[in-house]
Amino acid sequence: MSDRHEGWARLLTPPGSGAIGVIRVEGPDAVHIVRGIFRSKRADDGMSTSPGEIRYGHVLDGEQVVDDVLVVSHRVDAGLVVDVCAHGGVRVIEQLLDLLHRCGAPLRTDDSSPPPVWAATNVIQHEAFDLMARAKTPRVLRFLSWQSVHLPDALATIRAMVIDHPQRTCEALEALARRAETARLLVDGATVAIVGPPNGGKSTLFNRLIGRVSAVVSPHAGTTRDWVEAAIEISGIPITLIDTAGRRATSDTLERRAIQTGQARAERADLLIAVVDAGRQVAPLALSALLQAPRRAGVVWVQNKIDKESDVGVASQLPRNACTVRLSARTGDGVDTLVRALVERFGLDPGAERLPTCFTARQVRIISQIRTALRATGAQEPAACDATDRQWNELAGPYDSENADASVPKSL
Ligand SMILES: Nc1nc2c(ncn2[C@@H]2O[C@H](COP(=O)(O)OP(=O)(O)O)[C@@H](O)[C@H]2O)c(=O)[nH]1
Ligand SMILES: [Mg+2]
């Protein structure tokens, strides 16, 4: 059939399970191809070639019903394309695409759409495709797409040297796992909390960074009563930005609770933006709270309100060698410097993403098991070889869609 018909299929809905899955059949023979596999529920009519006219029926593979579907054609440029709207289960779509392929309409994907998960040939690729469907930014998509090809290759190369160079194998594996932090920041995203004394301009800065007014700004200390968060993207890194209530001694129970919950949220953040008013000395209590806050990616200090500057020596209160940015959240002056400082603190230079990197907790766990086995017994020991063979296969072996674990891979 395929040599008589010319067409191709595209998946219009995201890969993975959904309520419906829509496959568009395109090409000069799109209508012929769909007609050949579609049987309308009303015996007297088949697929309509009038654009927009929907028909309900079955897709048949020989005599076997693959799914009940709605079929509708559209005019695109000079020709007709046909949308097959089916149930969105992964297996149903897989079977429909397979049937269309056999009928002369193979699947076409382009770079901007992630490949369907079932197209994976090995376990790592399957994890990458699954996470790609949920990627929050194009940068994350590119990272996972690169890993889907290069991480399995790198593992094959490392595995090939296990007998002769067990020590080097361990080191190479360790490097893959060490870089997992890059993957975590990209795939899961980073959490950045804005902290500091009341009235420093935290909420104003929050609103400016998210590009809209979300947190209430006022000259009254204690205005922000709860933490507010928003999803933003900085340089392709998905970021959850959190505005917290400013810390101060207060008799207001509600405000005290807001301060505590904001503080707890900030404690789990990857990075803090500590905002102080450049025209005011920081109160000792607020300063000591800020100084006791070491974070994985550190603290970026912001001296805000430089538009109404009167230098009161705030700089001398801040830690020496601290990363400090002077800006005005109100006018936006200096905010681009802050954005650059945040990216720098994350240490995600584009080159680092083009290194093979573990990107799921499962990969890190199995790599650690292989390293332990190699260190304990040495590669020459047959028992160790058997054990690690099993682990290598579990790590990056062929993907078996029939027996695969259908759960979403746990990112880091
Ligand atoms: N002049 C000036 N005022 C600002 C700036 N940022 C914030 N403010 C003002 O400072 C007050 C407190 O701001 P807010 O964002 O609510 O501070 P927060 O309590 O730290 O969240 C408000 O009156 C803001 O308009 C700034 O960059 N320049
Ligand atoms: Mg506020």
Image: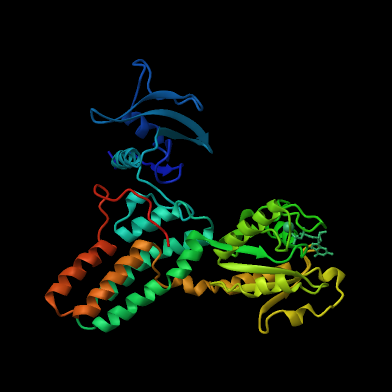
- Quadrant in the rendering for residue 97: top left
Q: Is residue 359 left or right of residue 284?
A: left
Q: Quadrant of the N terminus?
A: top left
Color encoding of the figure: rainbow
- Quadrant in the rendering for residue 393: bottom left
Q: How many marks?
A: 0
> Residue 253: image x %, image y %?
69, 52
Front residue of 377 and 51: 377
> Residue 121: image x %, image y %?
29, 56
Q: Is residue 93 left or right of residue 298?
A: left
In the image, residue 14 sits, relative to residue 125, either above or below, namely: above
> Residue 100: image x %, image y %?
33, 39
Quarter of the displayed picture in which ligand 1 can be seen: bottom right
In the image, residue 53 sits, relative to residue 106, either above or below, namely: above
The outermost residue toward the front is 251
Q: From where the camera sits, is residue 172 visible?
A: yes
In the image, residue 326 sits, relative to residue 229, either above or below, namely: below
Front residue of 258 and 160: 258
Q: Quadrant of the C terminus?
A: bottom left
> Residue 167: image x %, image y %?
27, 83
Front residue of 293 and 94: 293
- Quadrant in the rendering for residue 361: bottom left
